[in-house]
């Protein structure tokens, strides 16, 4: 039993689990928790007892929201929650100051929650396949961001703040309703890939974007 207590990794994936056993969160050394592909309808209660947690994967479940206790995981650097039913994120998420990767793809978000803009180390953000019609101002606060996936939402434009994400390398916007790109897009000098397929840009606009980003691979 003591060996289990000392475990750093726990993998419960693909087991049709509906509720995590309480004992899981009595492991003070637990760093990696994988509950991918189960039947969870709630984010596991008590997870904030494992302050050592660095990575959580609860993708492909039925989780509708996150508890405010998720903010009590000071060492968390990866949070993978794609393919759930999440509509909102608590403001307490902004306490995850070590978070580098956040995957919220294929959920029911209608906007990027303000708390996400307060994550100073965030490098990878995937909110594709949601129901967002706009990106709120303030995204320029994500100075470390390198990968941003907004594919398959309902966006018609991007805020000018996107152009201040100077470390951005990958910007994925496929399957939206974008009619124009910010005029300062040339500021994204480190951008390597830009996916604009399945949007509403004119040929003239596409040529202008190409001219502003000569070293970027672009899909239209």
Image (cartoon, helix red, strand yellow):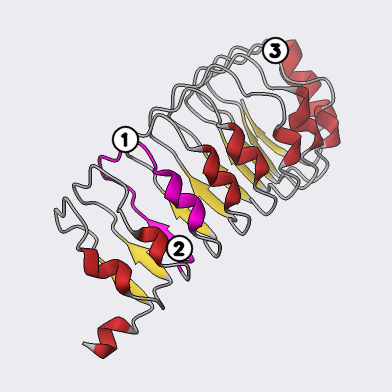
136 relative to 92, above or below: above
Residue nearest the observer in this picture, 138 or 74:
74
Could you tell me which quadrant the C terminus lies in?
Answer: top right
Q: Residues within 10 Å of mark 3 (few under 14, many from 20)?
A: few
N-term mark: 3 or 2: 2
Of badges 3 and 1, the one in the foreground is: 1
| Left or right: 143, with 61 as reference point | right
Residue 65 is inside the magenta segment: yes
Query: Element under label 3?
Result: helix
Could you tell me which quadrant the N terminus lies in?
Answer: bottom left
Q: For marks 1 and 2, give the CA distance.
A: 20 Å
Of badges 3 and 2, the one in the foreground is: 2
Span of residues in magenta: 53-72
Residue 69: x and y in percent read: 43, 50
Of badges 1 and 2, the one in the foreground is: 1
Residue 128: x and y in percent read: 48, 33
What residue does disc 2 label?
Answer: 55
Residue 123: x and y in percent read: 64, 51
Query: Element under label 1?
Result: loop
Marking on residue 128: none
Q: Residues within 10 Å of mark 1 (few under 14, many from 20)?
A: some
What residue does disc 3 label?
Answer: 203
179 relative to 149, above or below: above
Q: Residue at x 19, y 63 (%)?
A: 21
What residue does disc 1 label?
Answer: 64
Circles 3 and 2, Cβ within 8 Å, touching? The answer is no
């Amino acid at each position: 039993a003591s060996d289990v207590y000392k475990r750093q990794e726990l993998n419960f994936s693909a087991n049709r689990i509906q509720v995590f056993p309480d004992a899981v969160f009595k492991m003070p050394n637990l760093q990696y928790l994988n509950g991918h592909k189960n039947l969870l309808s709630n984010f596991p209660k008590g997870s904030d007892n494992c302050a050592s947690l660095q990575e959580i994967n609860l993708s492909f479940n039925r989780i509708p929201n996150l508890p405010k206790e998720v903010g009590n995981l000071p060492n968390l650097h990866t949070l993978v929650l794609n393919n759930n039913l999440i509509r909102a994120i608590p403001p307490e998420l902004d306490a995850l100051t070590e978070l580098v990767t956040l995957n919220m793809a294929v959920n029911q978000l209608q906007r990027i929650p303000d708390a996400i803009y307060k994550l100073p180390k965030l490098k990878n953000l995937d909110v594709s396949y949601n129901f967002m019609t706009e990106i709120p101002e303030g995204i320029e606060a994500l100075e470390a961001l390198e990968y941003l996936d907004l594919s398959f939402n309902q966006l018609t434009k991007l805020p000018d703040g996107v152009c201040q994400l100077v470390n951005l390398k990958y910007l994925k916007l496929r399957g939206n309703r974008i009619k124009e790109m910010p005029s300062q897009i040339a500021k994204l000098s480190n951008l390597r890939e830009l996916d604009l397929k399945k949007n509403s840009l004119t040929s003239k606009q596409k040529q202008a974007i190409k001219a502003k980003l000569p070293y970027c691979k672009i899909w239209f």
